[in-house]
Image (cartoon, rainbow, N blue to C red):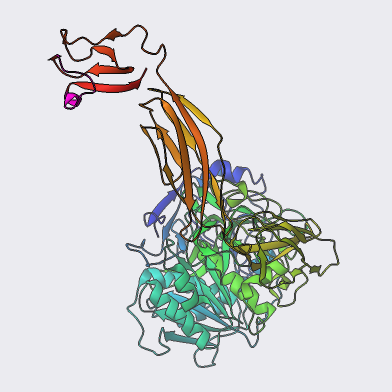
Amino acid sequence: MDKIRSASRTRSGWTARLAALGAAAVLVWGGLGGPAAAATVTAASATGSTATFVAGSATSATGSTATGSTATSAAAHQATDYVRSCAAPTRQGQMACLALRRTDVPAHRATAVPAAVSGYGPSDLTSAYNLPAGGGAGQTVGIVDAQDDPNAESDLAAYRSNFGLPACTTANGCFKKVDENGGTNYPTSDTGWAGEISLDLDMVSAICPQCHIVLVEATSANMSDLGTGVNQAVAQGAKFVSNSYGGSEDGSDTSSDSSYFHHPGVAITASTGDSAYGAEYPATSQYVTAVGGTSLTRGGGSRGWSESVWETSSTEGTGSGCSAYDPKPSWQHDTGCSTRMEADVSAVADPATGVAVYQTYGGSGWSVYGGTSAASPIVASVWALAGAPNSGDIAAQYPYNHTGSFNDVTTGSNGTCSPAYFCTAQAGYDGPTGWGTPNGTSGFSAGSTAETVLVTNPGNQSTAVGASASLQISATDSAGKALTYTGTGLPAGLSISTSGRISGTATTAGTYSVTVTASSATAHGSTTFTWTVTGSGTETVSVANPGSQSGTVGTAASLQISATDSAGKALTYTGTGLPAGLSISTSGLISGTPTAAGTFTVTVTATSGTATGTAAFTWTVSGGSGGCTGLTAWSASTSYVPGDVVSYSGHKYTSTWYSTGATPGAPGSWAVWTDNGAC
C-alpha cells in the first residue's frame, strides 16, 4: 500500500501522550523479568499474576491481572519500538499485513507452568468489551492470510494452554489449515506473515474460545490470491471471515468486491490500516465491515476501561477515509462522503496498549502485537458470539441497525481532514472508530431495532411539454414519525413539496432520473425512478426577435440570438441580409465590425435538423462620426502614400500604397485604396 512505511519505526513523543492519561496510567511491559527501562516491574505473586495497570497489562496464566503497587516513569515511553511484520507492497494489487510487533518487550518461550506475559490477554479483552466467557460453540471463524506459518497449530496450542482455553487442534476438529484451493499444498513459509497468522489465531481464541477456526493461506499477498482465500474460507463453512491486510485503492476494487467479498449470510471484516488518515482496500469494500483501531486503557467510568482514537503520528495510526471508487452502501448515511466511508466499528490496535501473542516461526515466543490487524479478528470473533447472519443478508449493515450497542469513542484523531469527522472522533459516527467498539454482542446481531424509512416507488412517469403534472410520493417510517420529502433530478418546471407532492408544468423535453428522499430527521429512505418529458405534439422552434438594431461604420457589434426547441433539441443558427462586416456563428452570436452604411433586413434561422424557426429585424449602420466633413477630397494630381485618408464619391478611402492618379473605387484600385464605407 502506498502509505505503508519502512519496516521498523521508533515511536517517540509518548511522554506527553501517556502523561495525559493521568497519574494512574502506569504501563508495565515485559511481564516477569521485564526490561530495565520499563515503567514498573512488579514482582509476581505465587499465583503468577502481576500488578494492575492502565495501558496494557502483564497477563497471568488465567488471563487476569491482580492489584499491586506500581510506580510511574515517563521515561519508559520515550523509545518504544515496533516492527511491521510484513514488507510494504511494491505494485498495484499487492497487499500487506497490518500487524505491528513490539521490539522493546523481551520475548520468551512457553513453559510447562503457565506464565505471566505482557499485553492484554483473553480476560482483559472480554472485560473491556463486555463479552460472555467461553462462547462460540458451533461457529467457525475464517482467517485469511498470505504465505505459510508452519508452526501455526503448535503456537496456537501454546497460547490457549497458557490461558486455560480449551484445546483447538486438527485432531479434535477445532482447527483446520488449508491452502487457497482448499488443499494442503501450502505456500512458501514467511516469518512476517507468520506473525500476522499468530496474532489472528490468538485473537479468535481470546474472544471466542469455543469457535472452530479455519486458516486459509493464500499463495501470495496479491489481492487475487487473498480474495480466492476469502472464497475458500466461505466454502469451508466459515460464517465470519477476518482480513487483516490492506493496500492502496485502485480502479479494480469494485470488481474485487463482486469476485471475493460479496457473500450474503457471511460477516466479513477488514482492517482499515495502520498509516493514519487515508482509505485502504479491502476495508472500503461495500460488502465488508471496516474495523478501525483504538488505544485501550484500564480505568475510567463505570465501564472500567477507556478508549481513544489510535494515532502515534501523522503517518502512524488507525486508517479512515472516503473511498475513491467504492459506492456507498444503502445503510451508510454520513453526509460528507458520497461513496463508501470507513470505518464501521473499531477495537484495540495501538501497539502501546497491545495484545499478547505467541509466535515461534519468526519470533521467540511471547510477544506484544498491535495494529488494526488485531482489531479485525477481534470483531469477527465478537460477531461469532452474536451468531451467524441471516441467509441472504449483507452482514455489514448490522452495526448500523444497532448504533447504540457500542462503546462510543469520542476523543482523538488520526490526522487532518475536512469534514472533521473523517479523521476526528465525535459523539456517534466518525471515520476513525465508526460507531465505536463492541459493548457485548448485540451490535452484531441479525435482528433490527433501528428506525427505517421505506419510500414507495411510483414507477416511471411521462409528461408532455406544456402539460401540468401532479404525483404524490408516499413513504412509511417504522417508528411512526412524520416525514418530510426532498427531490433531485426533477424535470424543469416541476418541484416537490415537503409533503411529497410533485407538481408543476414541464417546460423542457428529455429523460430525467428523479430521486425522492423521505426523512424523519433520525432516519431516511429514498427511491429513484425515470421521468420522461416529451415534446408537445409537432416540434417547433421559436426564435426570440431582438428588435431593430443600429450601429456605426467602424464600430464593433455583438448580438446573441436565442431560440428554444419544443422537443428540447440542440439548435444551430444561420443568417442572411447581415450588414457588411458582420457574421453569425452556429451558436447564434452575431459579431464583427460594420464596413458600409445602410439599412439592412436581417433574417436569422435556428434549426434542430427536424424543425426550424426564424426572426427578421432591421439593422441600420450609419457612417463614421462627422461624415465626410473634414476629409480631404481626392485629387488626381496629388501623390498619396500609405495611410493617407480622403473622401471620394461619398465614401471614405484609406491609401494602402504609393499612387498618383489612381481613382478610388475604380477597377484595379483595390490594390491602392481601401473603401471604409459611406461617409
Q: Nearest the camera: 391 or 595? A: 595
Q: Position of residue 252 (x, y in %)?
A: 42, 68
User: What's the residue at 41%, 26% (across, down)?
Assistant: 556
Specify the quadrant that holds the C terminus.
top left
Q: Residue at x 37, y 8 (%)?
A: 629
Coordinates of residue 19 in the picture (x, y in percent): 61, 43
Tell me if I can see residue 123 in this picture: no
When the figure is inspected, residue 168 is found, relative to residue 189, above or below; the finding is below
Question: Residue 377: within the magenta?
Answer: no
The span shown in magenta is 661-671
Residue 2 falls left or right of residue 460: left
Left or right of residue 521, residue 214 in this image: left
On screen, residue 547 versus residue 85, left or right, reads: right
Tell me if residue 664 is in the magenta stretch: yes
Q: Is residue 423 visible?
A: yes
The image quarter containing residue 400 is: bottom right
Question: Magenta segment, principal secondary structure?
Answer: loop
Give percent across and percent down for residue 654.
25, 17
Taking depth in this image into account, of 388 and 396 the one nearest to the observer is 396
Q: State how many labels appear.
A: 0
Above or below, comparing residue 547 to residue 241 in the picture: above
Q: Is residue 219 left or right of residue 355?
A: left
Q: In the rendered view, would you say 1 is above or below 222? A: above
Quadrant holding the N terminus: bottom left
Residue 35 pos. (x, y %): 48, 55
Q: Say which quarter of the image contains residue 387.
A: bottom right
